[in-house]
Amino acid sequence: MKNIFGPGNQLTAAVIIVIGLISMPEYLVNGQISTVNGKAGKHSNGIGISVKNVNSVVVDNDNIKWFSTDVGIVSFDGNNWKLHEDNKSLPNQNLKGLTYVDNPEGPELWIASPNGATVTKLPIDDKTDAITFNPENAPLISKDVLGIAAGKDTIRWIGTDKGVSALSNDKWLTPDYDMHYPERMFMLFPITSMATNLKGDSLFVGTAGAGIARVYRDDVDGISGASVYAQWGPIDLPSDNIQSIFIAPDGTKWFGTEEGVARHTGNNTLDNWTVYTTDDGLVDNFVQVISGDKKGNIWFGTKAGISVFTGSSWISYTTDNGLASNNILSIATDNNGSVWIGTDAGITSYENEKFINY
């Protein structure tokens, strides 16, 4: 939902949107931090946390923002920042990304890390229980989890360095996609991003060099494979090195690469492909994250700033426009329409046509 999922995140199970800005020498993020336009107040206990490399942003139903950073999981409820470092059941190092799932039994936060797929109920406090799935306690292909995705369905898709596993209502689905995608393929062409269709029963898997793999839940509780989206014939991809994936509410599929972005509409694999590059309005061709806002605009986070596509026109933002960093890693839109941006230099929001650095 880095891109691995950020440059996604839509890996995400929850639709989120992000845009990157911000760059301060260092800034403090913690409990009672007060920060606007780059001026950070000190935490009430006097401890400052330098936050960088914000590779994932998700927003829950209470409009709390959750960030995976180089120092662990950080949340912001609109007034208070919190670094969730005291709950020892949660991973806090080398986080690959977050996924929010609005489960009827209680909202879930999924965390991808090299030690497995961790799930916890929200809200989180120092004693909240969490479960980390790995090959020792579950039929997970590998403990090195690169990203997690979910849609409206009950399936949680878990991408690893050896392929894709899936969990549905406490039952693990049986992988049966080797004919299309053998384990060695994912080891040679690692997963970089994932996104489900709107229902959540099929998955688009971006890879580093092999295009977009496609898997889906079959009728016998297994995971089957479909043909790959790659550079051949009428499939118009700028590159087979996929950096980001986003599925819009209308079903339009967006794929970011280091050579531009591709849009695919409709259900016919071979038709309706369009490529956009800097020649069309992108600020940079290396598209690390894609998301959408409440107005239906599509946001593209690149290594050189942000571009927003309205459907007919483009507008771009860089440090010249006030962004603290041009290296955009994650984007998500909150329940009020504000856009939250993760970068290699911290967190920024875009509200009322103004950037606010925290």
Image: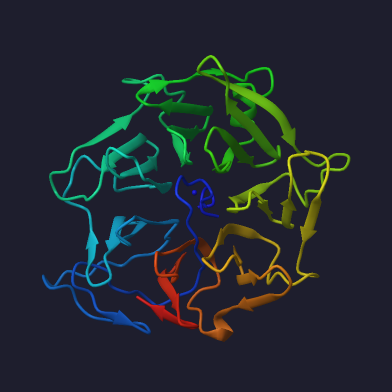
Above or below: residue 63 compared with residue 138: below
Give x and y (percent) for residue 301.
58, 64
- Image position of 228 (left or right of 354): right
Q: Quadrant of residue 119?
A: top left
Query: Left of 319 or right of it: where is 71?
Result: left
Q: Give left or right: position of 278 versus 169.
A: right
Judge whether 288 appears above or below 145 on screen. Answer: below
- Which image quadrant for residue 71? bottom left
Q: Residue furthest top?
A: 220
Viewer-closest of 94 and 235: 235
Asked if 217 appears above or below 16 in the picture, the reply is above
Residue nearest the observer in this picture, 344 or 310: 310
> Relative to the observer, which residue lies in front, 216 or 21?
216
**Position of residue 61 measured from the top left corner of the image (x, y, whole percent):** 33, 55
Residue 302 in view here: no
Residue 285 % position (x, y):
71, 63
Is 317 or 309 nearer to us in this picture?
309
